[in-house]
Image (cartoon, rainbow, N blue to C red):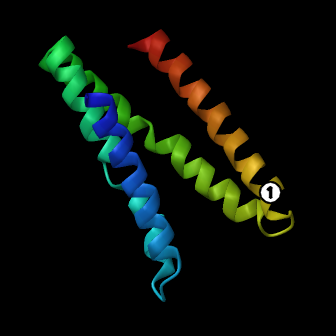
Amino acid sequence: MGLVIKAALGALVVLLIGILAKTKNYYIAGLIPLFPTFALIAHYIVASERGIEALRATIVFGMWSIIPYFLYLLSLWYFTGFWRLSWALTGAVACWGLSAWVLIALWSRFH
């Protein structure tokens, strides 16, 4: 049942993004993915299964995970200046993937 609730929350977020993208305030659609819907779920699961110390470590890692998202946005902004949208999105996702991989590698080594 918990999986159905999580899927429904994800679907509601996608629906809200779609609705907002069609309004005059379309830019708010970029804020919706940053609402901590999935973070709330992840934090609840980590805390209930692993304890508060694991939750606190997850929170710190989450703070560092802002870097790959920022690099995704920065590279998407840059790539859309000269690439078609599909290539720009692909390149930005690649930048996110590479930076997330580096973050995980560094976290695993130093934490």
Residue under label 1, please give it.
Answer: 86
Residue 72 visible to the viewer: yes
Specify the quadrant of the image occupied by residue 99: top right
Q: Nearer the viewer, residue 91 or 37?
A: 37
Residue 110 to residue 20: above or below = above
Q: Secondary structure at mark 1?
A: helix
Percent across and percent down for residue 93 are 68, 44
Percent across and percent down for residue 74 are 63, 57
Residue 57 to residue 67: above or below = above
Q: Residue at x 50, y 68 (%)?
A: 18
Q: Residue at x 44, y 62 (%)?
A: 15
- Is residue 109 shown left or right of residue 81? left
Residue 105 to residue 24: above or below = above
Q: Residue at x 60, y 25 (%)?
A: 101
Q: Quadrant of the C terminus?
A: top left
Percent across and percent down for residue 70 are 53, 51
Percent across and percent down for residue 11 are 42, 51
Specify the quadrant of the image occupied by residue 48: top left
Q: Residue at x 43, y 13 (%)?
A: 110
Q: Nearer the viewer, residue 24 or 82?
A: 24
Q: Tell me which amino acid carries mark 1.
A: Ser
Tell me the crowding category of disc 1: few under 14, some 14 to 19, or many 20 or more residues within 10 angstroms, Cα based: few
